[in-house]
Each structure stands twice: as structure tokens, then as C-alpha cells.
Image (cartoon, rainbow, N blue to C red):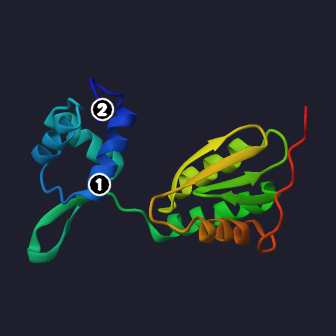
């Protein structure tokens, strides 16, 4: 839930999520869904937001039209390629504990890897928390954190079950 007014980028992010989660067939419905989440917006504002996002109406079962924000296949592929490149360039070790995957990077590089993971939109990643040379990846509920760690390890070009290098002590 959001309270009060939010900025344009925040509102558009909420709209993108709503369009991905709900079958929204009118701008008025979108205004109502935003209001349910505490976001105040007029139909004219929502119309501009949909235009900014490149949203289009697509036909679904029964011929009804719903709004969608298209993501070109090549953009999704670039995202995966970009993630592989970043992980292989910056990750030097990966470990796991419970639902956390720990990635070790050279000093000052954890935020680069965290940003790439955040933008990749992996469904099994709930959140990332970056320090200086360590990044914690929180596995989403229901996903196998071991499989997530191995997937990230493979993208980084690290051998399976490679040990996590210790961080330097003070």
C-alpha cells in the first residue's frame, strides 16, 4: 500500500505492475486500482502515463481488450546477456545460507551487480542488498535458493559449489 501522492516515476512503476498483475481494460479502472493502493491520479494523468509507458490495448480471450506494456524480445535477451556479462566480470564467489545467496565482488563493486540483478527482473529474486564487496540476494518464497545460487554461479562462469572467498578483516 502507498499513502498520499507519489511521484510520476513511482506511479508509472505501480501502473506497470498493475498491468502485469491485473486485466485492466479501461483508464477509469486503472484510476480505481491506483486509488485502492492510495495513489491519487486523474484519468488524464493515467492517459499520459500509459502513453509514456508505451502501453497498448491487446485482445485477450473473448475479444476483450486489456492494457499491456510490451517488452520486445530483444530487450529481454539483452537483459539476460547483460546480467551474464556483469556477473562474469564482477562476481568472484557465491555462497548460500537458507534463502540468502551471497555474492562476493572486488571492493566497491557490489552495487553494480545488485543493480544488474534488480533490472534483470528474475522472478526468483525478491530483493538485493549491496554493501561494498558483498551482495545479499534474497530468494523469493517458493523458489529453490540452491538452484538460484547455481544459476547465478553459472552466469558468472564459476565452477559449481565453488567456495565463497572470505572478506578482508579489519
| Residue visible at 17% across and 55% down in the picture | 24
Where, quadrant-wise, is the N terminus in this rendering?
top left
Q: Secondary structure at mark 2?
A: loop
**In the image, residue 100 above or below residue 31:** below
Q: Quadrant of residue 168?
A: top right
- Note whether 90 is above or below 133 in the view shown: below
Residue 34 is situated, as x and y percent measured from the top left of the image, at 21, 39
Q: Nearer the viewer, residue 105 or 27?
A: 105
- Residue 144 % position (x, y): 54, 68
Which of discs 2 and 1 lies nearer the camera? The answer is 2
Badge 1: how crowded within 10 Å, few (<14), some, or many (20+)? some
| Screen quadrant of the C terminus | top right
Indicate left or right for 105 with 4 as reference: right
- Judging depth in this view, the residue of 30 and 108 nearest the camera is 108
At 80% across and 38% down in the image, what residue appears? 108
- Give how far across and how far down residue 135 sits, in percent: 69, 47
Please say if the residues under marks 2 and 1 sit with CB atoms less than 8 Å apart: no
| Residue at image location 67% in from the left, 41% down from the top | 130
* Distance CA(mark 2)–CA(mark 1): 23 Å
Picture coordinates of residue 98, whole percent (x, y): 60, 58
To which residue does mark 1 refer? Answer: 55
Could you classify mark 2 by the number of other residues whose Cα lies within 10 Å: few (under 14), some (14-19), or many (20 or more)? some
Mark 1, secondary structure of its residue? loop
Circle number at residue 130: none
- Mark 2 or 1, nearer chain start: 2
Which residue does the numbered mark 2 point to in the structure image?
2
Q: Residue at x 49, y 66 (%)?
A: 143
Side (left or right) of 20 relative to 168: left
Res. 8 image quadrant: top left
Relative to 63, does residue 104 appear above or below in the rendering?
Answer: above
From the viewer's perspective, is 111 left or right of 30? right
* Left or right, 16 with reference to 153: left
Amino acid at each position: 500500500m502507498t499513502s498520499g501522492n507519489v511521484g510520476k516515476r513511482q506511479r508509472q512503476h505501480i501502473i506497470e505492475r498493475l498491468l502485469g498483475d491485473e486485466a485492466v481494460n479501461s483508464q477509469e479502472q486503472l484510476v480505481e486500482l491506483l486509488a485502492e493502493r492510495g495513489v491519487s491520479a486523474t484519468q488524464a494523468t493515467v492517459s499520459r502515463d500509459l502513453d509514456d509507458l508505451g502501453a497498448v490495448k491487446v485482445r485477450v480471450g473473448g475479444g476483450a481488450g486489456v492494457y499491456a506494456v510490451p517488452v520486445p524480445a530483444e530487450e529481454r535477451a539483452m537483459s539476460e546477456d547483460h546480467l551474464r556479462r556483469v556477473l562474469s566480470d564482477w562476481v568472484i564467489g557465491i555462497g548460500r545460507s537458507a534463502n540468502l545467496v551471497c555474492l562476493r565482488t572486488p571492493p566497491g563493486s557490489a552495487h553494480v551487480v545488485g543493480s544488474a540483478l534488480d533490472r534483470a527482473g528474475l522472478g526468483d529474486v525478491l530483493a538485493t542488498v549491496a554493501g561494498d564487496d558483498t551482495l545479499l540476494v534474497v530468494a523469493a518464497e517458493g523458489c529453490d535458493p540452491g538452484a538460484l545460487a547455481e544459476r547465478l554461479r553459472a552466469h558468472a562462469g564459476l565452477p559449481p559449489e565453488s567456495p565463497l572467498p572470505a572478506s578482508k578483516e579489519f
